Image: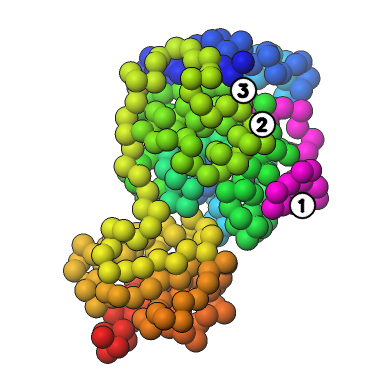
Amino acid sequence: MHPVAISRSGNIEQDITKALDEIGGLETVISKGDIVLCKPNVQGSFSPGSGIITDAKVVHVIVKMVKKLGAIPVIGESSVHGRVTEECLHASGMYEVAKKESVKIVDFDKDEVVRVPITKGTVLKEVRTVKTVVESDVIIDIPVMKTHVATGVTLALKNMKGVLPRREKAKVHFAGLEEGIADLNATFTPDIVIADGIVGLEGLGPSRGTPVEMGLIVAGFEPVTVDSVCTEIMGMDPNEIKHLEYAYSKGLGEIDIDNMELYGAPIDTVKRTFKEPWLQLKEFKGIELINGNACSGCLTELLRNLEYAKIDGRLDDLKNSTFYIGPDVQFNEKCKKNVLVGNCCKKLAEFGIFIEGCPPPGYVIREKIDEARRVLKTKS
């Protein structure tokens, strides 16, 4: 059995209640006295309704439901590297929810670190998580429905990277992002997923795309199953999302829609094809990208600023150039016009224009793109 429910009524509380009732209710996984980690996606300092973060109204409803069952809800998150998680949680409205409901909210970047072995990991053998995650009896994964420049989509599976504090997230990238996500979820497996599809994000996700009003809640017990349904709703093929396939192979749910028990609104009635992220530099003719498993921070900043340069007509001088990005990048000696993006490429700095940062700020990328235009023009 792989039950998933889709609800769209225009009322968030009604939709969450209906979707959960369809699959058996929170009481299926929560008992009185349980410590229940409510794990939203609060990757940066963005406001509810942006499509970038989980809407605080969704989390508020879930917290109230957990309390009603006699359990103890805890809201917890670690934002992306380079952000101050406490500031992000305030901007998102999560602290306000915690205050209204008198529940604990935990900044994982300030929590006690605990080392946890990754049993049967493909690329990860051990990670550092935090005490709050380890001591939770139940994990409710509350992702937002959006695209992602490095992984295609970011939903329940990708959201669990937030159980790792600070720069520990980089370990997943260095090990192999897609397989690392699967390894992580096999150890810290959500007990239930309630996906926020109220406002999603298309295009240059996870933070630079365009908001998409969907008005949906999607709920299920398995991260792969819910992610597959959400991916279908977004007009993409789950079998083409690598981390979904890896997690499916580890038994974390069903990837084939035909093998699921679907409740509520049919997928075809709520489907809306999202503009996909730029997984290559195909939007920028004449520019090659060599991606060595880069994080979304570097990728989104690079692509966003290349798009600005394209709009401004500043890309002609970069034709036939090669951009390198990511910790596993391999240098191509045949390429003579090179731009190295991010600290992971510092080892190759002597071979071209190096853009320092982790990730490099947008203004630095813009300055270096203009420098590259001047320097590389002379090599044409």
In the rendered image, the quadrant that contains the C terminus is: bottom left
Does label 3 or label 2 sit earlier along the sequence? Answer: 3
Task: Tell me the element at label 3.
Answer: loop
User: Is residue 206 left or right of 254 when viewed as pictured?
Assistant: left
Q: Mark 2 or mark 1, which is nearer to you? A: 2
In this picture, is 14 found above or below 203? above
Does label 1 or label 3 sit earlier along the sequence? Answer: 1
Determine which residue is flagged by label 2: 251
Q: Is residue 143 visible?
A: no
Does label 2 or label 1 sit earlier along the sequence? Answer: 1
C-alpha span from label 3 to label 2: 13 Å
At label 3, the amino acid type is Phe
- Spot occupied by residue 220 in the image (x, y as percentages of width and height): 57, 21
Determine which residue is flagged by label 3: 221
**Residue beneath the point at 76% across and 15% down:** 32
Query: Which residue appears farthest toward the left when viewing the image?
Result: 313
Query: Of the numbered discs in the image, which one, if any, rests on residue 250?
Result: none
Residue 236 falls within the magenta-colored stretch: no
At label 2, the amino acid type is Gly
Q: Mark 1 or mark 3, which is nearer to you? A: 1
Q: Mark 3 or mark 2, which is nearer to you? A: 2
At label 1, the amino acid type is Lys
**Residue beneath the point at 48% across and 67% down:** 325
**Residue beneath the point at 48% across and 12% down:** 263
Task: Tell me the element at label 2.
Answer: loop
- Spot occupied by residue 104 in the image (x, y as percentages of width and height): 68, 34
Are dots 2 and 1 in contact, CB under 8 Å?
A: no
C-alpha span from label 1 to label 3: 26 Å
Query: Which residue appears farthest toward the front when viewing the image?
Result: 334
Q: Which residues are magenta?
A: 113-142
